[in-house]
């Protein structure tokens, strides 16, 4: 289910506006055209040297930042001395939205809501003599631009896409955009870069079919995803524009965000088998959870055992794939969100 979001754009394809928030253009985008999101980090060449509990300020001398930009403080394994946030040891490598308090100091904010409410992170124990490198963190979106025939272009934006908690940065702007932990993409290991394992922003509207299990069999938190990376956002399962993702994030925990999918409301669907190009593959367990994108469903019927047979197709050649469920049509229909709420 597409919606409109606004982001602070630094570069739109070949059009460059600047490198910092002060130079960015606020743009409206349709979430339907967002394919993926990642981060780009730029070292400021400056260390954070002091954390002051009395003022909750972090000293980054001559930082050159603008209010509302995002920074990563420290590398994994850096020494943090006595530096505590909210009575817990500071974790080097975390990303914050910052607000400047002078040319040499910033406040750290842990979420978009905290920034908007001017609620800075509580430095409960200060520290001096720190040597934590600081990086400006920006997002990079792959966007299928309809104005260019759907050709994917790159957008550099101020807001980060990954290595942050869901609901922070770009994923705070739409229930369809989710930062997830991806183990593999098309069979290739896809590792996190910083302290966070949340390493890829995906668009739930582009999930054609997903099921719990993956290469580890009937394993929780291990989802296989047929992901539509096409320009049109209407690929079929056998399309060359479909990526296969192995996602460690529990997709059933965000069930109601699958508003355009079977299984997104009353109960996540139970899959039995899938037939693609004449080859049938059984799922690891018929009780495993799964979602199917509604725009790819042609029709369905119950077989003699009252088990649903769903015909699935995308754009392209004539024909269909068959998804067999371990439940009846009535159950499948009831599992869709008729009101399209988020």
Image (tube, rainbow, N blue to C red):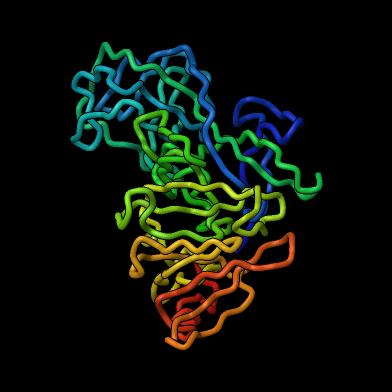
Q: Quadrant of residue 190?
A: top left
Q: Position of residue 214 (x, y in %)?
A: 39, 52
Look at 45% across and 45% down and name the residue there. Answer: 168
Residue 192 shows in this picture: yes
Asked whether residue 117 appears in the rendered view, the answer is no
Q: Position of residue 223 (x, y in %)?
A: 40, 53
In the image, taking residue 141 as reference, residue 111 lies left or right, namely left
Q: In which quarter of the image is residue 311?
A: bottom right
Residue that protrudes farthest toward the front in the picture: 278
The quadrant in which the N terminus is found is bottom right
On screen, 215 above or below 49?
Answer: below
Query: Dividing the picture into quarters, in which one does residue 233 lie?
Result: bottom right
Q: What is the total number of numbered labels drawn onto the structure image?
A: 0
Give the residue at x 36% y 31%.
Answer: 94
Looking at the image, residue 289 sits to the left or right of residue 21; the answer is left
| Pick the front one: 149 or 319 | 319
> Residue 25's spot in the image, x, y percent?
69, 37
Point 81% across, 47% down: residue: 149
* Residue 111 drawn above or below residue 79: below
Q: Which of 137 and 205 is in front in this view?
A: 205
> In the picture shown, does residue 250 fall above or below 118?
below
Q: Is residue 9 left or right of residue 101?
A: right
| Residue depicted at 81% across the width and 44% down the height | 148
Residue 335 position in % (x across, y down): 45, 77
């Amino acid at each position: 289910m597409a919606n409109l979001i606004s982001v602070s754009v630094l570069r739109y394809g070949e059009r460059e506006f600047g490198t910092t928030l002060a130079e960015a253009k606020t743009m409206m985008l349709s979430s339907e055209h967002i394919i993926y999101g990642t981060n780009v980090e730029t070292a400021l060449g400056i260390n954070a040297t002091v954390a002051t509990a009395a003022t909750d300020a972090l000293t980054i001398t001559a930082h050159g930042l603008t209010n509302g930009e995002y920074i990563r403080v420290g590398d994994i394994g850096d020494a943090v001395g006595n530096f505590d946030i909210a009575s817990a040891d500071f974790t080097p490598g975390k990303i914050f939205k910052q607000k400047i308090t002078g040319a040499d100091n910033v406040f750290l904010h842990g979420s978009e809501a905290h920034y908007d409410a001017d609620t800075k992170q509580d430095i409960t124990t200060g520290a001096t003599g720190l040597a934590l490198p600081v990086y400006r963190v920006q997002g990079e979106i792959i966007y299928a631009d309809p104005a260019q025939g759907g050709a994917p272009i790159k957008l550099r934006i101020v807001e980060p896409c990954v290595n942050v908690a869901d609901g922070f940065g770009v994923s705070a702007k739409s229930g369809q955009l989710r930062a997830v932990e991806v183990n593999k993409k098309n069979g290739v290991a896809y590792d996190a870069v910083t302290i966070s394992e949340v390493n890829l922003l995906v668009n739930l509207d582009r999930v054609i079919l997903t099921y719990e299990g993956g290469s580890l069999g009937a394993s929780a938190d291990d989802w296989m995803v047929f992901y539509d990376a096409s320009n049109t956002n209407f690929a079929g399962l056998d399309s060359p524009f479909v990526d296969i993702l192995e996602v460690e994030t529990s997709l059933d925990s965000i069930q109601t965000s699958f508003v355009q999918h079977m299984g997104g409301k009353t109960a996540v669907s139970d899959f039995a088998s899938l037939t693609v190009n004449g080859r049938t593959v059984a799922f690891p367990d018929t009780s495993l959870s799964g979602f199917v994108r509604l725009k790819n469903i042609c029709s369905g019927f119950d077989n003699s055992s009252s088990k649903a047979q769903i015909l699935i197709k995308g754009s392209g050649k004539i024909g269909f794939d068959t998804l067999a469920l371990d439940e009846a049509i009535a159950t499948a229909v009831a599992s869709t969100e008729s009101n399209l709420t988020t």
